[in-house]
Amino acid sequence: MMASDCNSTTLKLTSLERILRWNCDAAEMRDWRNQYEKFLLTRFNTLFAQRAEDKCLLDAFNLMPEPLAKDFLCAPGVVSILCRRSEYAEWQGKALAQLLLKVFANDLWLPPRNSRLTFADTNIALDIDSDFTFPDDKFGIAGTVHVEEPALALVLDKIDQAFNLVRAVSPRATETVKTFIDVLAIRNEPPKLAGTALHFYSSTFSGYAGLVRFTNVGAENASVEILADAFVHESIHGLLYAYEAVASPLQSADASDIVMRSPWSGALISLPSYLQACVVWYGLFHFWKLAISTGVAVGRNVVQLSTRARGGFLKRPFSSIPSSIHGHIAPEMSQLLDGLEHHMLMQEF
């Protein structure tokens, strides 16, 4: 089922073919964000309306200073409830009430305004020590740990350099990062067996729009260029998750059961991950193409990142999907991916 909870949106998914070439008007990204924030507030009020006994809590929320109320709505644990399409609205309302009570008791981690990243004019909250449990921290097997000093200072400096590289390459990509990343969590994997190297990776999580995790930033493979790539990469995922919340899913409810092979990594991934990957790599190709053409970033790392982004499209990823799978893809998403692939196959680089 690909129905929407909000029918008033003016967001057009197919506009991403143009937006992710990084020459759009910054106001367009803000419109996407404004509609997402409007959705969160509307959804919050709708879920609270299910529980008359929580009216006093709703009144208290409405008296909150706007910045604090916005921080609450954008907190990862709250977003995961608001963006969940479920018939159990009463349960969701009760869960939100419990989280709101924790805020009033100063017992809930929020993206704190006194702990923002030091990047100029951003509003990204830095999570270095919260006890938030990530969706992939199952039973502690894939758990992550906090980064301790003195390594933390070096990690934050490297992240700062990476963001500055994004800003130097493209104001529009920078706007996307600032607009669709609310919380940047910095974590490490626990130490592995002796002789086994840790590798950097970044993550977003379905249902948690705005939450990004950078893991093992201190690893040898985490160059400034790789981190800049991760900023852009994950912000595009955040944009797509926000679109799904406001407008409609990109695929059918059972699409996660369909497994595809990524033409970029060769790994087996679910259909939803595959569809988002096509959009993400399109944006990354144009980001690194811009970096090279302007001379802002040069060198083997940059060329490799651009070549990697283009490589999957040369294998015609979307047009090679079996016809039996197309029924699981939202029509507007199919139209977008047709356009992205066509444009990428015409590129000379």
Image: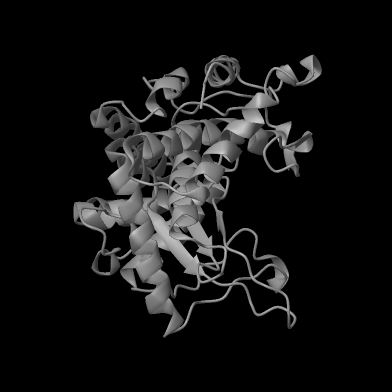
Quadrant of the image containing the N terminus: top right
Q: Is residue 321 above or below residue 205?
A: above
Q: Nearer the viewer, residue 204 or 58?
A: 204
Q: Residue furthest front?
A: 299
Please indicate whether residue 314 sits to the left or right of residue 126 in the image.
Answer: right
In the rendering, at what x and y percent does residue 31 appear?
A: 29, 30
Please indicate whether residue 300 sits to the left or right of residue 2 in the image.
Answer: left
Q: Nearer the viewer, residue 269 or 301?
A: 301
Q: Could you tell me if residue 83 is visible in this image? A: no
Q: Quadrant of residue 220?
A: bottom right
In the rendering, at what x and y percent does residue 94 appear?
A: 49, 54
Q: Nearer the viewer, residue 3 or 27?
A: 27
Q: Nearer the viewer, residue 244 or 169?
A: 169
Question: Residue, x 35% and y 39% (percent of image)?
Answer: 173
Label count reads 0
Question: Residue, x 30% and y 41% (percent of image)?
Answer: 175
Q: Is residue 328 above or below residue 260?
A: above
Please indicate whether residue 112 sits to the left or right of residue 6 in the image.
Answer: left
In the rendering, at what x and y percent does residue 324 appear?
A: 80, 17
Q: Quadrant of residue 252?
A: top right
Question: Residue, x 31% and y 36% (percent of image)?
Answer: 172
